[in-house]
């Protein structure tokens, strides 16, 4: 079972998380704790979805949609800056 504290600790250590990285991390962690565990990636995904949704609702973390939009804006800004720099050097 995943708890909020474990998710918050993970997010603090890995601020540029992806949902898949989180799922794999917690799946591996649960299997290390109990090698006989039959927990599945879908079970981990469901637990994470509920916890992340709760953390977003109470304002502990930025909603994923906003975070994704900010990441995309940042990427677009970096791309256009490097593209403009290359164009200017020609």
Image (tube, rainbow, N blue to C red):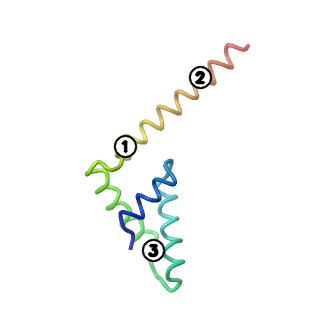
Q: Which residue is mark 2?
A: 81
Identify the residue at image location x=43%, y=36%: 70
Of the numbered discs 3 and 2, the one sitting upstream in the chain is: 3
Measured along the vertical axis of the image, is residue 51 above or below residue 75? below
Disc on the earlier residue, 3 or 1: 3
Pointer 2 or 1: first along the chain:
1
> Spatial distance from mark 3 to mark 2, Cα to Cα?
43 Å
Reading the image, the residue beneath label 3 is 40
- Residue at 45 percent across and 74 percent down: it is 40
**Residue at (57, 23) in percent of width and height:** 80
Residue 8, given in percent of the width and then of the height, sits at: 41, 58
* Circle 3 Cα neighbour tier, 10 Å, few/some/many (<14 / 14–19 / ≥20): few
Placement of the C terminus among the 4 image quadrants: top right
Residue in the foreground of this view, choosing between 1 and 75? 1
Most foreground residue, 30 or 42: 30
Say left or right for 46 vs 30: left
Kind of element beneath mark 2 = helix
Q: Which is in the foreground here, disc 3 or disc 2? A: 2
Q: Contact, CB < 8 Å: mark 3 with mark 1?
A: no
Tell me whether circle 2 and circle 1 mark residues in contact (CB < 8 Å).
Answer: no
Q: Which residue is mark 1?
A: 65
Residue 83, percent across and down?
A: 63, 22
Q: Which percent across, then down, holds residue 27?
A: 49, 70
Q: Quadrant of the N terminus?
A: bottom left
Give the SS element for disc 1: helix
Distance from the alpha carbon under mark 3 to that under mark 1: 26 Å
């Amino acid at each position: 079972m995943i708890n909020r504290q474990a998710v918050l600790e993970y997010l603090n250590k890995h601020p540029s998380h992806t949902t898949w990285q989180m799922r794999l991390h917690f799946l591996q962690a649960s299997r290390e704790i109990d090698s006989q565990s039959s927990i599945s990636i879908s079970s981990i995904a469901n637990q994470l979805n509920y916890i992340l949704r709760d953390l977003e609702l109470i304002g502990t973390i930025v909603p994923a949609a906003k975070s994704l939009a900010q990441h995309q804006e940042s990427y677009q800004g970096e791309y256009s800056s490097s593209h403009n720099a290359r164009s200017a050097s020609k």
